[in-house]
Amino acid sequence: MNRTLLFLLVVMLVGALPARAGEMPSLDDLAKWEGKYPNAVLSNHGFWDDTRVLDVMKQNIPAALREIIIQGWGMKDELIEMPIERQGDVLLVSVCKPHDCLSHAARLYFNLKRKTVQICWTEETEKTGKQLDIWIDRDVKRLEKGACWDKSGFDGLAAYGDTAY
């Protein structure tokens, strides 16, 4: 079984989400990323290199998933990224595995005011070809196959997200 899928299943069973830590610096100026690609350079660093982004991810995303996202499924230099979108206080960052976007992808919804991130995650096992779609916020919820991409942009957050998170 694919290591990523196995980890996701364990997370779903035991709820092994990171504990929330103390107060973080403001994320408000991350809004400047709207319309930019995460691999662009603003203020001398990329989106994934911003310590506040990394801190929010550390507090909200299991370590194995965080590494997959940041390392681009082992192909960091080729990671497929879409321009960052913004709706109100939420930034949407969409990424996927090179040459395999339909089977390995993530949509990250960063709430700048609440300093949280929610994720719609799609993973297909290489051995069985079965697709797993999950939503990660305070909890981990299994979604129907294809759910992460059936909804466009912010519709996924509205359909599956925790509005208080």
Image (cartoon, rainbow, N blue to C red):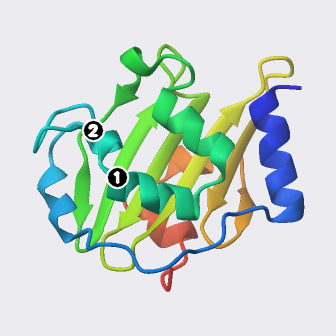
Image location (x, y in percent) of residue 129? 79, 23
Residue 37: image quadrant is top left
Q: Tell me the element at label 2.
A: loop
Asked if residue 103 lies left or right of residue 13, the reply is left
Task: Name the residue type under label 2.
Answer: Pro
Evaluate whether residue 34 shows in this view: no
| Left or right side of 108 for 32 | left
Q: Which residue is mark 1?
A: 51
Asked which quadrant contains residue 103, the reply is top right
The answer to whether residue 155 of the structure is visible from this angle is: yes
Mark identifier at residue 38: 2
> Reading the chain from its start, which is encountered first: label 2 or label 1?
2
In the image, what residue type sits under mark 1?
Thr
Label 1: element kind: helix
Alpha carbon distance from label 2 to label 1: 14 Å
In the figure, 113 relative to 49: above or below? below
- Name the spot of residue 154 as percent of width and height, x first: 37, 61
At a point 66% along the width and 53% down the height, the residue shown is 62
Q: Residue at coordinates 42% horizontally, 80% vertically from top-left?
A: 23
Name the quadrant of the N terminus.
top right
Above-or-below relation of 76 to 163: above
Image position, residue 25 (x, y; %): 30, 72
